[in-house]
Amino acid sequence: MSAAASLSVFAVELAYWQQTAIKLVVVAIVIPTAALILGYVFLLKMMSFMQSRLGPMEAGPHGSLQLLADGLKFLQKEDVFPRRADRAVFALAPAVVLISTFLLYVVLPMGPDAVVSGLDAGLFFALAVASLSVIGVLMAGWGSANKYALMGGMRAAGQLIAYELPLVLAVMGVVIQAGTLDLNKIVVAQATGELFGWGGIGFPFILTQFVGFAIFLVAVQAELTQPPFDMPVAESELVGGYQVEYTGFRFLFFFMAEFGTAFAFAGIASVLFLGGWYVPGFDVDSNWLNLVGPIVMFVKIMAVSALIFWFRFTFPRLREDQLQKFAWKVLIPLSLLNIVMTGIFKVFV
Amino acid sequence: MGVTARTMLRTLFPDGLTKPPSPTRGAHTVQYPHVKEEPVTRARGVIGLHHDNCTVCMLCARECPDWCIYIEGHKELAPPRRPGGKPRQRNKIDRFDIDYALCMYCGICVEVCPFDALFWSPEFEYSEPRIADLLHDADRLADWMDTVPEFEGYEAGSTQKKRAVPQ
Amino acid sequence: MTFTEREQQAYVDAASADARVNVELETEGMTLNIGPQHPATHGTLRIVARLDGEQVVAAEPVMGYMHRGYEKLAEVRTYPQVTTLINRIDWLGSFANEVPFILAAERLMDIEAPPRAQWIRTALFELSRIANISLFLGDMGVQLGALTPVFFAFRDREFVLNQIEAVTGGRFHPNFDRIGGLKDDLPAGWIAETKSVMAKMRGFCDELEDLLMGNEIFEARTRGVGVIPDHVAASFGLSGANLRAAGVDWDMRRDNPCGLAYESLDWKVWTHPDGDSFARYWVRLQETREATYMVEQLLDGLPSGPIMAKVPRIIKVPAGEAYVATENPLGVMGYYVVSKGELAPFRVKIRSASFSNISVVPWVLRGVYVPDVITILASLYFILGDIDR
């Protein structure tokens, strides 16, 4: 279960340091690329079309290089620190947020062997590192020495903690059904499952876990601080919340982390609920899935992200207290109920 | 969510779902430097000056709410209409400047002109990197006359007379 | 509880909240400056809010950052020149600003515009109402975090502005109203086109009803938020949709239609009993739709004839005083014109709607959460030029 095996389709064997280097490079490339693709396809283009406009059209064909140009602009900007800011904390915060995104990609499987590190408790690891970003956001809010940023940071902390719970509980149903925390084994469980005795397309867990899927998507929306749960940034109230004092490449870090995390969470959602990299007709252990799998995953990730961003462009945002109420009074009881139902299903069916 | 999805489809496929997508026509925006929006006939874009009609009466300069028209003139003798007659006295423009950095585009000058010397043109592309260049002199204003469109007709029931632009 | 008692009670509450914060939790309350540069203030309104956590203990609007002194400027301009100035007061519904001033001047001169001019005036008045309020309908969404409605608003408002431009020549600053009538008549083909635009605007209203008002989150954010009961609304001098959303059935168009053709139309004044942000949004949406029907009726029944009464070439308004108020998009707007029989008015006092409407802000913002501050400010719908003049 390593890159060595994943590359065996090309019949190459690599040393450990070579594998590590390749993994590092791949992850380092994947995150900005993912952020660029999501940003361009959804933020720039889908949103524009939903609003009867075209979006950027000048940089590259149909504006496809616009985000690269933006990134270049951010890199050129002066690195500004507010005078009263806690410099170390202020400077470190975007990096902390970005690292949490990096770590998410460690366990995201793109094929039976195409995974940076297939941990046995991969799902647990993913959810754990995802909540690391809270620390970065709090640091940003506190370090900026700005009232709006502080309020944004506090809101973000409250919100991310409140939505960590439904996120975990929502995936419990999948874990109960699959009987494992390993993301790859969850895919295998879906691939080898049978739909009323017919194994043609396997058994994507969304069929039984659609409640879990819905809760997961809502909680992801809140984790990403996107509308309707974007109170920590809330540009019309807090003028950007914890990001208010950031410019240049530090702001770029936040931007990349947001979209990189969106990509990763869409990936986890497609692994958990939509059957992951598995393509009906292939053998589950087939090496070809290492090549076809990433493409299938990419399509599924784009579908899930389209849903996430569609919410984003349509809904107004909730108020902070309404959001907490929604988490504790609706989502958590619902996901607990979902777990109970899954348990009954597992035992009796 | 239905509304946003419908709008997206309408933008992407202005001719219906079976035709190829064409967002450039589906969108309501105009890609400005490449495509120019056609302003309406009455649009107040820039003022054109018809030199022959101006008698340097200064009415426009006086009525301007922020006094952005600068006029200087002198009297000169023109040849008589009929041979043997007395030479006519005529006012000649030395200077007729409109400062578009000050202009509020109210149209009072065009309206008060008793001799039909000022006209609105819908042209709008005359921004300048230097603010001083926004002061258009008499020649520049005369050039704008070429872009003045014909007056349009009136809706039924109107008793207004249609005016004509001097050529 | 009478109003003063409530005021005192609120003061005691605020003081005790401060004490609670300072003594029991041993932390200080926070004073937050919302504005003058803040996306929720549509310009440069500053609101000094004293916070206890995320709760507003006291809030005070500070205005004047955009004061341009129109009342004083009007004293050194002739009557025809004043109209170009005053249509910059409420820059979104600018034609509506000119009408009350012209009506006041006409009353002083004892002139009445011919019927055709009055009908076209009313039609343009309602068009500027649609252009103004349609932007509010989208902007409310953006204040609540929904990105899309405002683009719909800009898209569809453009059609209305094009129609206004086709008649007046100016998208934002028409300067079309004259003492004794109008500057020009309607261009050919305008009526048919405007009717199709009105159908589009009704489609826009339906779309927003679906996209925003039918949305549970929007309802959760606006229902019961910023409730202004009818007696408070009346005592603070609120007007327009803010007052009608509090259940007060008062509309200058119906109750005092001077010089405009509202009496010959078949229309309805919309009110809502709740007085909260949702009611204000609802009333404005209904008014926009009602206005589209009114414009259609006006264009159908347009009388023929001249558009200008007999007016001297140099306008000197006889000495006297006149006050005329009309129901502008934002509320009641009035001009008190004092003339000494000269070319320029001696004194012009402008009663603008937004200035009175935001006077309720300290009352209504007490005890709400910070996000609700934005909801309430957005739903009160002020325009900075209309506050500061």
Image (cartoon, coloured by chain):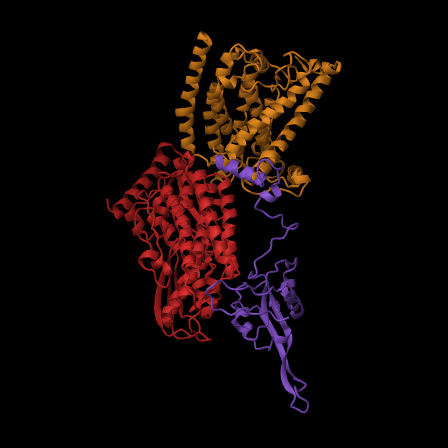
Chain colours: A orange, B purple, C red
Which of A159 and C308 lies nearest the eye of the viewer?
C308
Q: Position of residue A44 (x, y in %)?
A: 59, 38
- Residue located 75% across and 14% down the image: A11
Please identify the quadrant where the C terminus of chain C is shown: bottom left
| Residue situated furthest left in the rendering | C1
Task: Classify residue A106 by image quadrant.
Answer: top right
- Residue located 57% across and 64% down the image: B102
Inspect this view and state whether residue C52 appears: no
Numbered marks: total: 0
Inspect this view and state whether residue A195 appears: yes
Which of B64 and A94 lies nearest the eye of the viewer?
B64
Task: Classify residue C16 by image quadrant.
Answer: top left
Q: Is residue C225 left or right of residue A257?
A: left
Q: Position of residue C355 (x, y in %)?
A: 39, 54
Q: Is residue B25 left or right of residue C302?
A: right
| Residue situated furthest bottom in the rendering | B84
Please identify the quadrant where the N terminus of chain C is shown: top left
Task: Classify residue A83 by image quadrant.
Answer: top right
| Residue situated furthest top in the rendering | A348
Which of A158 and C256 lies nearest the eye of the viewer?
C256
Q: Position of residue B24 (x, y in %)?
A: 62, 43
Q: Position of residue C36 (x, y in %)?
A: 47, 49
